[in-house]
Image (spheres, rainbow, N blue to C red):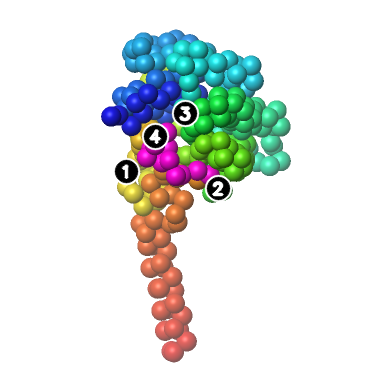
């Protein structure tokens, strides 16, 4: 039996990158999937590729009525809802504190935090009647490690991680598991969009993001290879399946070790400099 046999999942931001890859992995592993996103052409193309096991619905997650409609669509098409993956996102905008644009901040919060709450609101109603379900909120290492992302995005992801824990405490008694999933640097179009590339060009050339990430991996990650969408999709598969039936309120970090500390390759020159400086001081003192 496949890990998601008989299960129905909704994936927001499902038209490209992590969302699209996860939709494919879920269908391969037996699930029926609703792909939710704003780009109708891409969503319909992916749903067509995945066949009868997939359906697309155009969704703007910052609009509550769209989120409600997305959940209703899943139940209408496939009869139930076993997994919601809140994955929709927008770029991390960088600004100094003195230059922050509060309208941009509100827009990022609407997609990365408010939409997560909206998704859980409507998914929980269906899952509670079933007595089972798994909610996966895609967060980021930026949500708990400062300095890597912009203020807006980082604050929203931090909020998403804690919102996950709060929801897990309430929904556990209804048989619903709620976890967050925090990727590190992943070679996606979304990563390249943050660097200023146009959306379609970025999505069509993930190798651009991979090249950019490769240029810093040695200094940032202990694992010396670039994260890909399938690395996140496989983690989501675990959280969506019964293999994680005893896991809730957790933040699963998939980042190549970025958040664990400083890679030895980056620290080694400083350690050697520290040693040489101490030895020079000792030599000068004894002279």
Task: Report which residue position mark 4 lands on.
Answer: 241
Instruction: Answer whether labels 4 and 2 touch (C-beta < 8 Å).
Output: no
Range of magenta residues = 238-249
* Res 83 label: 3
Q: Earlier in the sequence, mark 2 or mark 1?
A: 2
Q: Earlier in the sequence, mark 3 or mark 4?
A: 3
Q: Earlier in the sequence, mark 4 or mark 2?
A: 2
Q: Position of residue 244 (x, y in %)?
A: 41, 41
Whether 72 is drawn above or below 271: the answer is above
- Secondary structure beneath disc 1? loop
Image point (53%, 44%), residue name = 249
* Res 144 label: 2
Instruction: Answer whether labels 3 and 4 touch (C-beta < 8 Å).
Output: no
**179 and 188: which one is in front?**
179
Q: Residue furthest left?
A: 1
Image point (36%, 28%), residue name = 4
Other residues around mark 4 within 10 Å, as few (<14) / some (14–19) / many (≥20): many
Report the mark closest to the observer, 1 or 3: 3
Image point (39%, 56%), residue name = 263
Task: Report which residue position mark 1 lands on.
Answer: 225
Report the mark closest to the observer, 1 or 4: 4
């Amino acid at each position: 039996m496949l890990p998601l046999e008989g299960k129905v999942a909704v994936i927001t931001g499902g038209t490209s990158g992590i969302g699209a890859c996860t939709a494919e992995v879920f269908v391969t592993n037996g699930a029926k999937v609703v792909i939710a996103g704003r780009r109708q052409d891409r969503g319909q193309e992916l749903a067509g590729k995945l066949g009868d096991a997939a359906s697309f619905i155009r969704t703007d997650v910052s609009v509550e009525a769209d989120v409600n409609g997305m959940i209703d669509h899943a139940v209408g098409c496939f009869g139930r809802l076993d997994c919601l993956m809140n994955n929709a996102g927008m770029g991390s905008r960088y600004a100094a504190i003195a230059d922050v644009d509060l309208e941009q901040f509100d827009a990022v919060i609407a997609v990365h935090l408010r939409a997560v709450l909206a998704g859980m609101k409507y998914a929980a109603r269906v899952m509670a009647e079933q007595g089972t379900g798994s909610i996966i909120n895609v967060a980021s290492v930026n949500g708990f490690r400062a300095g890597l992302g912009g203020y807006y995005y980082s604050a929203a992801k931090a909020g998403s991680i804690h919102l996950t824990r709060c929801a897990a405490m309430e929904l556990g008694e209804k048989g619903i598991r709620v976890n967050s999933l925090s990727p590190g640097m992943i070679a996606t179009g979304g990563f390249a969009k943050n660097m200023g590339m146009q959306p379609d060009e970025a999505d069509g050339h993930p190798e651009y993001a991979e090249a950019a990430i490769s240029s810093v991996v040695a200094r940032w990650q202990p694992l010396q290879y670039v994260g890909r969408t399938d690395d996140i999709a496989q983690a989501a598969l675990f959280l969506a399946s019964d293999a994680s039936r005893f896991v809730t309120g957790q933040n699963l970090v998939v980042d190549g070790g970025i958040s664990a500390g400083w890679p030895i390759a980056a620290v080694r020159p400083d350690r050697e400099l520290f040693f040489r400086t101490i030895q020079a001081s000792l030599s000068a003192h004894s002279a």
